[in-house]
Image (cartoon, grey):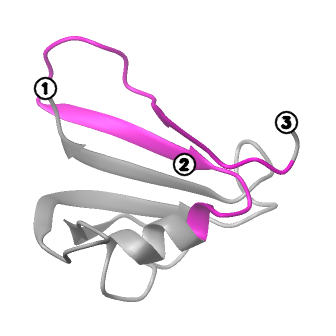
């Protein structure tokens, strides 16, 4: 539906060293903010970040994150990509 924020694995299933999770929609930036404790990276530049459990703030992974603000993304919406440890 229009206006929804969608979170999905973009790298496919199976055993892999890296998994790509894509967040697309109006709340994508908020999702990124809740998963990290530092400012968003500059648009379209990868940055290494700790991903945190939003409830406990414990580190759950270290990942490359990318921020694509609307309308300058491949969907025209806000998009976040998380390149995290797979499997």
Which structural element holds mark 3? loop
* Image label count: 3
Q: Nearer the viewer, residue 27 or 76?
A: 27
- Name the residue tied to disc 1: 87
Q: Nearer the viewer, residue 49 or 2?
A: 2
**Residue at image point 20% right, 77% down:** 57
| Quadrant location of the C terminus in the rendered image | top left
Left or right relative to 28: residue 1:
right
Whether residue 85 appears in this view of the structure is yes
Of the image marks 3 and 2, the number of the one nearer the N terminus: 3
**Residue at image point 32% right, 71% down:** 54
Of the image marks 1 and 3, the number of the one nearer the N terminus: 3
Which structural element holds mark 2? strand
Of the image marks 2 and 1, the number of the one nearer the N terminus: 2
Mark carried by residue 23:
2
Q: Nearer the viewer, residue 48 or 60?
A: 60
- Name the residue tied to disc 3: 1
What residue span does the magenta drawing correspond to?
Answer: 3-29
Q: CA distance from mark 2 to mark 1?
A: 19 Å
Which structural element holds mark 1? loop
Magenta-colored stretch includes residue 16: yes
């Amino acid at each position: 539906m229009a206006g929804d924020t969608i979170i999905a694995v973009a790298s496919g299933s199976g055993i892999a060293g890296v998994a790509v999770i894509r967040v697309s929609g109006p709340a994508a930036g908020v999702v990124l903010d809740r998963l990290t404790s530092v400012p968003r990276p500059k648009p379209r530049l990868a940055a290494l970040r700790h991903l945190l459990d939003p409830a406990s703030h414990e580190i759950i992974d270290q990942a490359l994150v990318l921020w694509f603000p609307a309308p300058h993304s491949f969907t025209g919406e806000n998009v976040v990509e998380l390149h995290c440890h797979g499997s």
